[in-house]
Image (cartoon, helix red, strand yellow):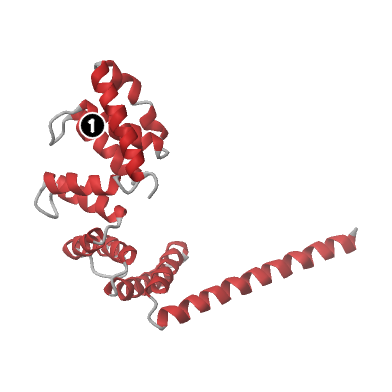
Amino acid sequence: MVNHMRFAISAAILIAFCSTGSWADDTADMRKKAESGDAAAQFELAQYYEREAGEARSERRALRDQKRAFDWFTRSAEQGFSKAQLNLGRVYFHGHGVAQDKDLAVEWQIKAAEQGLPEAQFSVGNIYFHGGIREQDVERALDLFTKAANQHHVAAQKQLGILYFEGVAVPQDVVQAHLWFSIAALNGDSLTQGYLPPLEIIMDEAQIDEARTLAAQWQTDHMGE
């Protein structure tokens, strides 16, 4: 019994050691690629330091890792890596590892949105929709929401459904509301599935048919992407 326990403990230590070694090797390889100028690796390394900062047991270590994350996000973003641009914008917005600068935060997120990153399109769309950091521009916000929604960004799809249903900043359009709620449900948002039955109560048969036809066409146009 004792021997079995010793064997189990030894095996666990060996597995942990091997796992740690593999993780360390992966991190070293990622750092090597990042230092050679690989933008994707720079982004991954920045995310690694961001996670480390979140798990740090001291403020000093957290700040150190935040600054390292900021540095690698910046290097990657300056090479045009859209995900790094979006994350660098978030870093500036929250002031993690750098002085808070909401104007720069928006600028970097706009760069990512202009490259077609749906998460950035949705984020910048909200900035223009609500105003504050930038002058409110509902038309631009709707354009960005729609671009993100057409790239399967479920939150953008749901947002469009709500805006058209409530007629917030846009004329109320139950057909468009049904369309976007249907697509969001199709893409995995179970809550929006529940929005459809009460919505159909206030729609006539022709409107429901039109919404379903539009949803079917959207699937044909976008589900293969």
Mark 1 Cα shell of 10 Å, populated few (<14), some (14-19), many (≥20): many
Task: Return the residue nearer the eye: 10 or 81.
Answer: 81
Instruction: Measuring from the top left, give residue 88's x and y in whole percent.
Output: 29, 66
Please, what is the three-letter code of the amino acid marked with disc 1? Gln
172 up-or-down from 118: above or below: above
In this view of the protein, can residue 41 be seen by the observer?
A: yes
56 up-or-down from 174: above or below: below
- Residue at image position (20%, 32%) is 164
- Residue at image position (40%, 36%) is 186
The quadrant of the image that shows the N terminus is bottom right
Task: Return the residue nearer the eye: 60 or 195.
Answer: 195
Instruction: Measuring from the top left, give residue 208's x and y in whole percent.
Output: 28, 22
Task: Return the residue nearer the eye: 89 or 118.
Answer: 118
Instruction: Measuring from the top left, give residue 7's x and y in whole percent.
Output: 83, 65
Is 13 left or right of 38, judged from the image as shown?
A: right
Please tell me in which quadrant of the rendered image residue 15 appears: bottom right
Residue at the disc numbered 1: 176
Instruction: Measuring from the top left, give residue 69's x and y in whole percent.
Output: 37, 71
Local SS, label 1: helix
In this view of the protein, can residue 203 be seen by the observer?
A: no
Q: How many marks?
A: 1
Is 125 left or right of 6, judged from the image as shown?
A: left
- Residue at image position (38%, 34%) is 185
Q: Report the residue that reaches farthest toward the bottom.
A: 36
